[in-house]
Amino acid sequence: MPDQYETVANAKIGILMGSSSDWPTMQAAAKTLRDLDVPYEANVISAHRAPRRLEHYCGSAEERGIRALICAAGGAAHLAGVAAALTPIPVLACPMKAWSLEGLDSLLSMAQMPKGIPVATFAIGSAGATNAALFSVAMLAGTDEAIDARYRAFRKAQSDKTFPLPPIEG
Ligand code: RP5
């Protein structure tokens, strides 16, 4: 079973997607983790196309050192909820714009988890992907001084940026 998904030895965050069609959007999460030097792994494991693989992945993630899962899916978007049902580690959900409704279907599917199995849901699309990654970094920062320092530096650099307006045309 492990050879049906890729693991990274020291990964702290697992990105899961329902389809490779989610990857163009979810690269924003991967890039954010990469830029903040947080080890991660990324896999396509659909909750409905590969449920047993998902069960295996989620069942072994904690013991491999994964501290949070970022789950992206579109449409019925049950990946995050099923993953959260299979592991106690925090699950952050990224709603994808799939084939209809501009991602509102995915957002509601993810946000409307029945009580007892928590899923933290972010914005539709790449903004949510970026913020889910930043949120996972903020979680890790509580117990890792080096990650904490990088996260604070990122936030400060963002705050220090100025946005000069271009001159009036004409
Ligand atoms: C979901 O259905 C995936 O997460 C994706 O967002 C959507 C469409 O998947 P594909 O038909 O492109 O594989 O399961």
Image (cartoon, grey):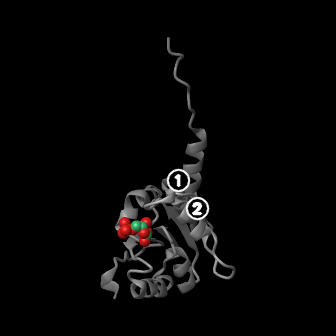
Mark yes or no: residue 111 visible: yes
Q: Which sits in the foreground, 6 or 8?
A: 6
Q: Secondary structure at mark 1?
A: helix
- Pointer 1 and pointer 2: residues touching (CB < 8 Å)? yes
Q: Tell me what residue is drawn at x 38 percent, y 57 percent.
A: 24
Position above or below: 157 against 110: above
Task: Where is residue 122? Give x, y as percent.
Answer: 58, 61
Task: Where is residue 90? Give x, y as percent.
Answer: 58, 75
Query: Which quadrant does the N terminus fall into?
Result: bottom left
Q: Which sits in the foreground, 98 or 9?
A: 98
Q: Tell me what residue is drawn at x 50 percent, y 71 percent.
A: 77
Mark number displayed over residue 19: none
- Rendering quadrant holding ligand 1: bottom left
Q: Tell me what residue is drawn at x 61 percent, y 42 percent.
A: 159
Which residue lies under the disc numbered 1?
Answer: 127
Type of amino acid under label 2: Phe
Position above or below: 145 against 10: above
Q: Secondary structure at mark 2?
A: loop
Q: In which image quadrant can residue 112 be found? A: bottom right
Which residue lies under the disc numbered 2?
Answer: 122
